[in-house]
Structure formats: C-alpha cells, structure tokens
Amino acid sequence: MTPSLECDVLVVGGGAGALTGALTAATLGLDVILAEKTEYLGGTAAYAGAGLWLPLNKISAAAFSDSREEVGAYVAATTDDTGFADLRTAYLDAAPEMIDFLLQDHSLDFYWRAFPDYYPDAPGYKPQGRAIFPKPLPAWVLGDLIHLIRPELPLIRGGHDTGSRVEGGRALLGRLIQACVRAGVRIELESPLVELETREGAVVGARLGGPEGDVHVRARGGVLLAAGGFDHDIEMRKQEGHPVESGWQMGAPGSTGEVLAEARRIGAGADLLHEAWWTPAFRTPLGPSFRVRERGHPGSIVVDQDGRRFCNESLPYDRIGRAFRTRVLDGTLTLPAWFIVDQAYVDRYGLNGEPPRAPVPEEWLSGGFAYCGEDLEKLAAALGIPGDNLVETVERFNRFAETGVDEDFGRGGNAFDLFFGDPEVDPNPALAPLKKGPFYALPMILSDLGTKGGLRADPHARVLDESGTPIPGLYAAGNIMASWTGSCYPGPGAPIGSSMVFGYLAARHMVDRAAT
C-alpha cells in the first residue's frame, strides 16, 4: 500500500519562488510540504547574482525617487503586445508588499546597488535600476543547512570563489531556507512529482516519487508548481522553435519539463512556449559561461561567420541574445559567433573570468575554447572566417573608438552601455580600439537562463485551463509559468523576482481559500 501524507499546501520545486511560496503559507499558519526532485534546493537561482527586479520596494525607495506612474510607463512600453496586462498589474502591486512581508523574518535582508534597467530608451527608465540584492552572510550562520543549497558553478562557467561567505543567489536561498525551516516547512528532497491527483476537476494532491517508493500527498489548500521550465528538454524546445542544442543551457539540471507536461495532461493551458530568458555565452570545456560584464568592456567586438559585427555588443544579455536568436532563425548567423579582443584587453580586464594579465589557459587554446593569432589575418585563418573582412571590421571599429561614436550600432550611446564601460577610456568609455597583438577569440553560442513560457495563470497565480478558467487547487510560479514579461526582460532580476512574487501571491490565495 502506497504511504500517504497530508498538508494544507504542497509546493513542487525548490527554487526561490517555491521557497517564497512555502514560507508565506507557513508563516500565515498553513501546514506546508516542499518537494524537490533533486538532491539540492535552489534551482537556477543558485547560479545567479540574485538581483530582484521589484519596483517601488522600500529598500530601493530609500535610494532614489520612483513612482507607480514611471514604473507603469516603463513596463507598458517594454511589454505591450507580448505581456499580460492583468499579470503586470498584479506583479507591480504585490512586489513591494512581498518585500515588506519577507522583511518580517530576521533571516531575510536585502540591499540596493545600482544596476540599470535594460531598456534605456523607454519612458520611465531608471539608469540606477530597480533591483535589490540579498545581503551576503557567513557560511557558519547556516550551519548544516548550507548542504541543502545547490553548489556554485565552476569558475570557468561564471561561478565565484566566495570563501567563507555565501553570496548572490546562494545567499538568497540560504536565507529563505533558514526562514522556511523556522516556520515549520517540511522539506523533502529527491521527491519528484509523478502525478497530479484530481477530484471533480480540482487538484487535491499529488503522487511523489522517492528513494523508498511513491508517496501520496493530500493537499487541502492546493498545489503550487514552481519546478522550473523545460530548459533541458531539447526535443520540446526544438518543436517550439528554439534554436538550441543540448549543453548550451545555463539553467539548473532539474529543469526538464515533466511537471509542465503533467499539468498540461490534466488540461492546463500554456503560452509563450517559444520564449526564454536568452543570453549569449562563451563555450567552455565544462559548458556555457554566462558573463555580464565582458562584452561591455571597451576593446571587444562580436563578429559572425563572415567576420562582420551584427549588433551592439554592450546590449543587455537578453537583448543581444535575441539578436543572436533572430539571425540564427533567419539564416544570417551560423554559430558560434566570435568574441574578439586584443592583448591590451586581456591585460586590463582578463578573459572569461581569468584575472588581468593572466595568460589564456593552454587547455582553452588546445581544446577549441579559445583561439589566438599574432595578427588579425592569422586569427581569422584559425577561425575559418574571411581575413580581409575581419581586418576591415576592426579598422572601422577602431575609427569609431577614436571619434567616440559607433556609427553602425550606437554602442556607448546610452546609460546601460556606459555602466559596464571604463571611465578611464576617452572619448567613449564603451569603445576602445583593438590594436595590440596577439589577438584572441572566444566562441559564443546562444544560451539562456531558463525558458519563460509555460502554464497560463491569473493574477492570483491560479493555473488556467485551456478555456481560461482557473483549475481549483493548482497554482504556478517561476519559469513553469508563462511570464508576465512576454518577450521582454525589463531589468536585472526579473526572472527570480517574478518567481518570488507569484509564489507569494499563490500562497496568499491558498490562505484565503483555506479560510473559506
């Protein structure tokens, strides 16, 4: 006989949205089980810097002036035609409320630092940005709980050696885990969702797998699905038009799409399945490397298979990722593209996380993860691209660096571009010439921070069926949910912030549901 458990709320997933939903429900008096299919909590948030794009929260309000009118204008200008108006409103209403709620627990603490919004030409844009960040904490504060958090990425893939401190996404997760444990959340690892259980059209629980066999969980108040997207289901992604290959994804390994498939099996509707949080990434021996700053430093360009620039290299990662995606789909870009710098760049900034002046690792050069040429013609020959085109491209770019005006793509012409520029470089901090050999190239692929299409939900995070009617007892948050942002990425931390806000809204609705 299959063993059974009971609770008020079952949360499926272990990332920031799942933990926020679990914490909210437990703090408000409900009995909560959180079931994560892998051996760690954290999901892709564990790899993130963990900016949280949460406009009008009290922490950023203390740093700069903002208003609902400005935020509304910015969001409307960047997400109209692709986002969902009801979800946008719910998000903007709930974001500051959620931060106030979380700050009631002494484990949760945040700070503001400047990081610009991603659409500098939109009304309501804030060059200082609307993101807040979790405060780092000493590892000893977490005790044994630190072993529940998904490990940091290796340095070559964008990870960091944080020593005895827990920072970024892992700090956010550690703080949420502490609070959840204190609130009485029952955490079950290696407990994948096998089946949603329904009665008379409502979700009443689920069957979970586990090391010792299946377990039935009856959930009196509802089931929150916050298990990530379908990042690693390459067959489904290609069916939905994603120009991706296996091994290109930055998302955590647990995001394989079976929870989304199970919800659709019982009639849940879906949208935006062609979408993702796109980014270019360097190809490395251990997988894609997501870097925010490197493209913005002066003295770097990105070229295609013909040795030509095709975009503003300093664009926010989702926007340049979309430029990659569009050109791959229309056949004008063959991957990899090439990130090209000279020795002066390597000496000043380093390459793919290596410190300044460090030699490019021999294993990169011998393994096809970096290329070197004493001059541009030799580099082009190593890359298999036309040497005369690359020379012409670099000479043209160098003229732009001298005048300070990128006549082709406008690089360095807005606040976002300049944020990652070098203030010691004149006349444009985002532009410097490539002159000092040897020259280096890193292969760039199209990666993503997760899919962002999934279950259609309402402003309470209730999952909707294919006719648009809420399925009683079923909720969604995070990348398993069709994002309120549509095809836009408004600012740093929109994915994690969205996951947390809709996890919070789902829990609040389940609390109200339980009360009635």
Image: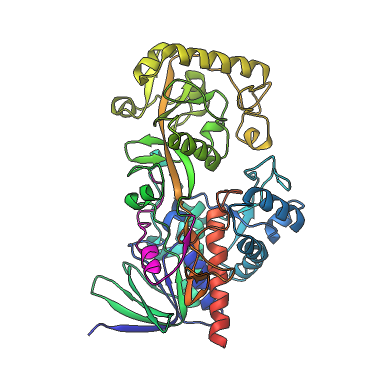
Image point (63%, 55%), residue name: 111
Identity of the residue furthest to the bottom in this view: 516
Residue 229 position, x and y percent, is 42, 57
The quarter of the displayed image where residue 399 is located: top right
Location of residue 511 in the rendering, given as x and y in whole percent from the top left corner:
55, 80
- Range shown magenta: 249-272
**Quadrant for the C terminus in the image:** bottom right
Q: Is residue 253 magenta?
A: yes
Note whether 123 is above or below 145 in the view shown. Answer: above
Q: Position of 362 compared to 32: left or right?
A: left
Which one is nearer the viewer's eye here, 49 or 376? 376
- Tell me what residue is drawn at x 39 percent, y 40 percent: 288
Residue 412 lies, in percent from the top left, at 64, 29
Tell me, yes or no, if residue 218 can be seen here. yes
Is residue 67 visible in the rendered structure shown here?
no
The quadrant in which the N terminus is found is bottom left
User: Toward the viewer: 327 or 105?
Assistant: 327
- The residue at the far front in this view is 467
Above or below — where is 482 with respect to 448? below
Q: How does the figure colour the protein chain or chains?
A: rainbow
Residue 194 vertical position relative to residue 164 in the rendered view, above or below: below
Q: Position of residue 515 (x, y in %)?
A: 57, 87
Given residues 341 and 223, the one toward you in this image is 223
Given residues 67 and 361, the one toward you in this image is: 67
- The quadrant holding residue 413 is top right
Based on the picture, tell me whether residue 63 belongs to the magenta stretch: no
Total numbered circles: 0
Q: Quadrant of residue 127?
A: top right
